[in-house]
Every structure is written in structure tokens, then in C-alpha cells.
Amino acid sequence: MARKLVIVESPNKVKNIAGYLGDDYVVDASVGHIRDLPNPSELPADMKKGPYGKFAINVDDGFDAYYVVAPDKKKKVAELKRLLKDSDELYLATDEDREGEAIAWHLLEVLKPKVPVKRMVFHEITKEAIQRAVNNTRDLDQQMVDAQETRRVLDRLYGYEVSPVLWRKVRRGLSAGRVQSVTTRMVVERERERMAFRAASYWDVEGEFAPQGSAGEAFTAKLSALDARRVATGRDFDDRGNLKSDNVFHLNEQQATSVATAVAAATATVSSVQEKPYTRRPSAPFTTSTLQQEAGRKLRMSSKAAMGVAQRLYENGYITYMRTDSITLSDSAINAARTQARDLYGAEYVPDQPRRYQGKVKNAQEAHEAIRPAGDSFRTPAQVAGALRGDEFALYELIWKRTVASQMADARGSTATVKLAVPVADSGVAQSAEFTASGTVITFRGFLAAYEEGRDVERNASNDDAERRLPKLSEGALADVLRAEADGHQTSPPPRYTEATLVKAMEEMGIGRPSTYAATVGTIQDRGYVGKRGNALVPTWTAFAVTRLLEEHFPSLVDYDFTASMEEGLDRIARGDEGRVAWLTRFYFGDEDSKGRVGLPDVGPTAAEGLQEMVEHLPDIDARAISTIDIGDGIVVRVGRYGPYVEEVVPAGVDAATGEVTAAEAPKDPRRATITDDIAPDEMTPAKARELLEAAEDDGRVLGQDPVTGHDIIAKAGRYGPYVTEVLPEPPAPADGEKPKRTKKNAGPKPRTASLFKDMDLATIDIDTALRLLSLPRVVGTVTEGEGEEAKAVDITAQNGRYGPYLKKGTDSRSLTTEQQLFDITLEEALKIYAEPKRRGRAAQPPLKELGNDPVSQKPVVVKDGRFGPYVTDGETNATLRRGDDPASITPERGFELLAEKRAKGPTTRKRTAKKTTKKAAKKTAKKAPAKKSAAKKS
């Protein structure tokens, strides 16, 4: 009987697909990519000095790439070759996007099959889809492979040419990336806008009105104009706090209070009533981008967590392929959605004609259909509730609702706008005031019965379109004023990106593709360029330095339009409109035909100067200047080797503008202070910097001398908190003519160091307390363990550890409740603690903070202090707080997001080590076989 080998990417697909295909097919997984470009250091010795030595790519021979099978994939490759030997046909069933096509090509290159090969593609894992796919195969799409391999080569050239510049000029270990660096720049630019922002204050008046004699029909309205001149709102100010136009009335507190007083004493007249129909259409089905955005808004999932959950839903046959920028639905999916909407909500909720959505994303390139429930008929959330739970159920329900709603009727209703005139001559501000109230009444909910899209936080947003009903009013009718109050406001800075809004911006700008959104957002956080505060993405000072270097010396590499044009170039290669070698040649070596032409980017596929020439001809870069950010008032932030710090470049007592000394005595050396991780860049104002500098006056303050050693004891403010340490004397200098001895970097005695307790203050700590801290660990007493000849003396010590204060007796440790006990606990008290039964874990402590109910599990979420630090939990899932998450100030949204990420990873499974059964005698006689050497081959 003929055997057919089917190779998929993920092992999670194997069981279902094998079941749908039957016994004639053997299904196995490649477990992702089987080979990749090696690091140059991993190349064979004879290749390290050749044309492949720098990148593992021969840029002079058509950008030929040297691929090697990854060490952890060699066993898998051997297994696939063994299965292929016994097979009559090979089906490559990797995903039908560029990366999946490239994986299939690599499999062909490595396995070298001698049997017929077929490319099998599907967008969902259902029996019908798999059987259709196996009966409708195609050839490998070499153009898609070329596009993906071009992307891989491009990213290698970019990273290996630019990253070393960052190592030399900013800090070792940093990396640059074609999409990563541009995305980092987006976050940095938003923070720069916030740093430059200056708030403006403005006032308005809110009134509560009711038709005369009908106090039960009260409604609120806002002051909109004074003497027919519109009253200024937040949108009328620029980011410097100035009015954009002089044609608005800018109310201050005194004026607003006077108007409110006059309004409260007057009677209003309805001056205008307008009513117009309201129609709202459903959103299109999910793409990768919109799924990540909505999962972030509604389920508090990070982009990475959302894609992890979606991957599992796809692999287990619940949804279609989740990496797509298409919003179209197949005919069978449209019919399934319309049928379910009709069955669940009624025929009137389904329009006469199906809705067909047209994509707005330029060069939509991935799968051919939107993300939707799998199958020709959809399973409702109730039908999958027994199989799915937690995040998987919540995300499936979200996708199901969005898909069904996309084929439902519009929501309909009416929007009314009422204007009221109120005389305010007594205010001394104006003669008449106009108040406006708007209300929307939805008479037919349509698709809203199934689903309503979430919204991101908008700057200076109003809720004028909120659903509310206004009383029936007619022009000329009188209204009583029930209340009038002046209300003050401040303009708000541009909101920071969240993962959802960053992905949305990347898609709109054409930066990256569906398969890279989540990975890019995760990478800029993992590399230390961006941190999180709640859901908001906050750039680090390192990101400022790296972005500045790239902007000044590689401007086009972080240019948004240029980055988008590179994606378009890859799309042209995928369509066969352009060759990969010619495109890469122009990017790396430049375009001779373009020299002298105006308006071209500085580097890239249409550039006169290629990346190679740009790097070789870099001007001298001032590393100190690149890592310096001026925050004004004679103060700068510098990114140093050990972290960011503020420096007073113009000391107090010196005029920052003229350099004139204005004080009797100005300090000679600039003051410096470490910036702690909890201070965001937009919070680092000159005032905040001076606060840190003043606090740092105590940094390095000599508290006194240790009477035993004579060494100075100093108090310092470190990046991870205040501490005390001793100053060891410098080693003696070598005698004249004597060569200094070469010693290891960390050789020699280390100074004693101790962190301050939580209730201690750096400014008030004294020498006695410092010496007590440095005396830890303290011997509380000595006890005798054992009997007779085996009896021995054992010390009980009080120590301060990573997880808090504790006692230690030999290998037996017991927790203490307070840090003060380290100084005070007696031997008698310690023995009493040891006499108690040892508890596993610590005694239950009250939660540090309560965050409310989780949107997925619907269970209360709290912050607790655990053995390994603070964490959030809903009773089912625990998630450790990350660096930068403060237990006292963590927001509910951040807590829910951490839990969602933990759930998305799935349960932790640990492999059990197999029990060794080899006999000792066999061990003695066994000889180690010599390792065989094999020549490295290009594979």
C-alpha cells in the first residue's frame, strides 16, 4: 500500500490532520524552521575568512546565503528522512504565507526527496478543509520563497552592519533591526511629544435643565458659546499650551464662576432643535492587527499573548489561520454567519444582501481570508464551552461575535441636538450664553445585539455621541435651570501607545506585516528599549540614545515611508515583478543610475548610496553627545554604562543662558544623580532632576569610621535602592622600576555592603545603624545538635535574604516577620520559632492590593507578596510582576494583562528523567567510542 508523508510546521496539528486523512498518510511536524543562517563564529574554519565570513552571506555572488541545520533540529531531520524513505509521495503542508513557503523550501533543500512532491495548503483545520487541500495541491511558489529569503538576508545585513555602531557608541549588547528600530522610534517620538507638551487650563460651565414644570425630565448641557463666540475646549489648544485661533472665548475660573452664577438665576429658552437619523455599520471581520487590538482592549491581552492563544485555537481546529491582513470572508463563511445571526436574533437582524468587505491595507499579502470560526458552519460559544476555557474561550467568543456581527444589519436610531439660550448680562462677561446637549436614541440595535467594538483612549475626547434620550422640546419653549456649575480642565498630553494602538499605527503606516507585529512589539520590550506602565508603552533612556544615533547618522533606515517602501519592494518580489538579487544589490551597494537625482531616500533599493557605503563613510560620532538628552534649565540626562543619570551641566548659581556667575560661589564639579526605573522620561523635568540632585547630596556621604577597621562608612543611593558600604584603601603602588602585578579583574577583598531596611531613610541614617547593618548576618546564639560523640555546636544566624529576613541553623531556615528582628531577636525567641512545626511556604499574608474581577475568569484579582517577589493572582493563575511594575501602583489593566500572558503560555510541563537501568558491571567494561569527524557541508 502506498504511503504518503505529510509534513506540517507544528506538532500540535499532527493528531487532528492525521485523523482527517486516514491510515494511508503519515503526518509529522518539522517544528518550525529546520535551518537558518549561522552566526559567523559558527561557520566552518575554512569559510570564516572567505566571502561568507562576515554575514554567512556572499554579497558578491548574488547574495547567496549559507544555511545550516540547527543543532537541535538534526534529530528531527534524520527522523523525517527516515519517514521519507518509506513514502511514495511527499506533501509539504506548512502555512500558506511567506514564512510557511520558505519552511517548505528548506525542507525540500535538506530532504532532497526522490518521490513526487506536492504543496498542500489550508486555512483551517477541519475535516472538509483538509480533504479539500489534499485533493487540490499546487507547486511550491518560488516567488514567495524569494520574498521571504530576501527579508531574511535584508535583516541580517541591516543588523550586522548597524548594531556594531550601537555597541561602539552607546552600549555593548544593543541591537538594531529594520522594523524593530523604526517601531522604537515611534514610541520615543510619542514620549518626546509628551516631554515638550505644556498643559493649558480652561473652564466651562455645565448646566442641568428641565422643561418648565417637568423636573423629572432633567438633562445636562454644556456651555458652547458666549455672545455667539464659541467657548474654547481642549481641542483648541496646541501642545505648547497656546490657542490655535483667536476666534474662541477662553474662559478663566473667575469668568466661568460668574457665568454659572448668572445662569443659575435665569430661565433658559430653547433656541434650536435638530434631529437626524443615526446609522452605525458593523466592523469588518478580524485581521491579525484588529484581533490584537481588540484582544488588548476587551481581554487585556498583550499582542504576544493574543497570538499565542489564537495559534492554539487554529491548530486545534477552532478558527481559521490567524496571520492575515485580509478582511474578506468565503461564501460558505458568509452563509454560516448569516444563518447563525438569523437563527439567534431573527430575520430582521440580517440584511437582504450579504456584506462583502474590501481591504484597506495596501499589499495585503498573507492568507486569503479574515480570521473567523473554522468550518462551513460555526460552533457557537455555548457549543465549545466544554472544550475551551479561560483565554481560549474568551478569544474564540470574541472572534465568533465579530464574525457573526459583520453580517448583521446596521444599528439605527436618531440623534437630537438641542441648543438653549440663557441671558447672563449680570455676569459681566457676556450678554447671552448658549448651552448644547446631544442625545442618541437607538431604535433598532442590529449588529449591536451581538457585538460592539472597543475604543482606545482618545485625547480630549467627549462623550457627546453616548446613547441617551433627551426630552421632547420645541423651539421657543422655556426650561428651568436646576443647576449650573463652573468646571475647570487641563489639556492632556498625547496618550502613550499601548500594544493595541502601536500595532494599529504600524499597520496604518505600512511598517511590518501581520506575521511580525506581535514579535516586533515583544522584541522592543525584551531588548530593553521599551517598558510598561500599566498598559502604556514607555521608552527607556537607552531607546532615546539609540534613536538619536539612527536619526542623525542612518536617517532613512528609521524613516517611516522608506520602511514601508521596503515592504512594498518585498511584495513586488513575491508577485514576480522584481528580482531579489537586483533589489538587494541596490539596497546594499547603491544604485549608480540614481546618483545626482533629487528626492530619493539616502539608502535602499532606489538609493544612490547603499548601506555598505553609508557604514564605511560614517563621520566621527560623538558618543557622549549621542547619549545626552537636554531637559532644560542647565540639566541633561546621560545614558551611561551602568544606566541613566542626570547631570547639572550648568551648576546652581550660574545663569544657564549667559554663563554668568550669579551666586557668591558656584560649585566646580557638576552634580550627578542616578535615575531610578520608576521615573518615566516625560516626568524628568528640571524640577524633578533638581530633586534627585539634592537627594544625591547624601549619596556617598561619609557617616563615620568603623572603629575596628578604621575604614570610612558611606551611604549611597543605588539603582536598586539605598545602601551603606565601606571604603577600602587603595592597594599600594609598585615601587620604582617594579612592574605592577597582573591580577584578575575581581581579585582582592570586596567591601562590605548592606541595603537599608524599608523603614530607613538615606538622609537620616547614622554611623551606628550603618555598622549594625554591615554586621549582618548576626550570630543569635549557639546550640548543640546531636548526642554523644556526634554532638556538635551549630550557630543560629539572622540574615537578610532576597526574599526577606530569616533565621538559619545549618540547613534549616525559618522566616522572620520583620527586618527589625534581625537586630533584636534573642536565642530564646529563635529556639521558640524552631520548636514550631516547619510550614511549607509562609503564613498567609493579606493581599497588597485588590484589582477587581478579571475580565476572563470573572474572579477577584489581588496582588500578593510571594517567595519569589510580588505577583498577581485570580486564585487559578499566578503571574509574577515584571521589573518596573510597582505592587502599590499597579493598575487593574496591567494585572489582567499579566494573567492573560501567563494563561497564553499554557501549563508548565516538566520532563521526567528516565531511570537508569544500566548495571554497574556494564559501566566498568564499557569504553567510550571515539567521536567521528565529519566535514561541514553547505546544507
Image: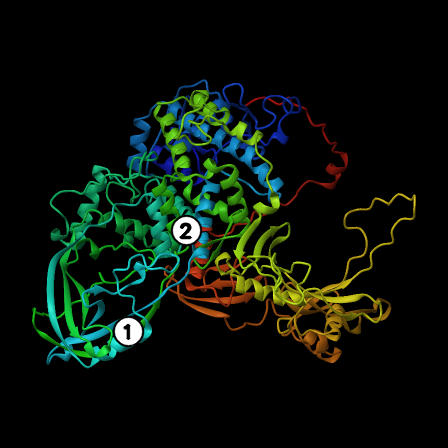
Residue flagged by tag 1: what amino acid is it? Ala
Residue flagged by tag 2: what amino acid is it? Glu
- Say which quadrant the C terminus sits in: top right
325, 161: nearer the viewer: 161
Left or right: 670 with respect to 108?
right
Left or right: 599 with respect to 51?
left
Identify the image quadrant of residue 140. top left
Q: Is residue 94 visible?
A: no
375, above or below 641, in the image: above
Q: Are marks 1 and 2 in contact (CB under 8 Å)?
A: no
Left or right: 651 with respect to 27?
right
Q: For numbered disc 1, what is the local secondary structure?
A: helix
Q: Is residue 465 visible?
A: yes
Mark number displayed over residue 499:
2
- Say which quadrant the N terminus sits in: top left
Separation (CA) of disc 1 from disc 2: 39 Å
Q: What is the crowding at mark 1: few (fewer than 14 residues within 10 Å), some, or many (at least 20)?
A: many
Foreground: disc 1 or disc 2: 1
Q: Position of residue 633 (x, y in %)?
A: 54, 59
Mark number displayed over residue 256:
1
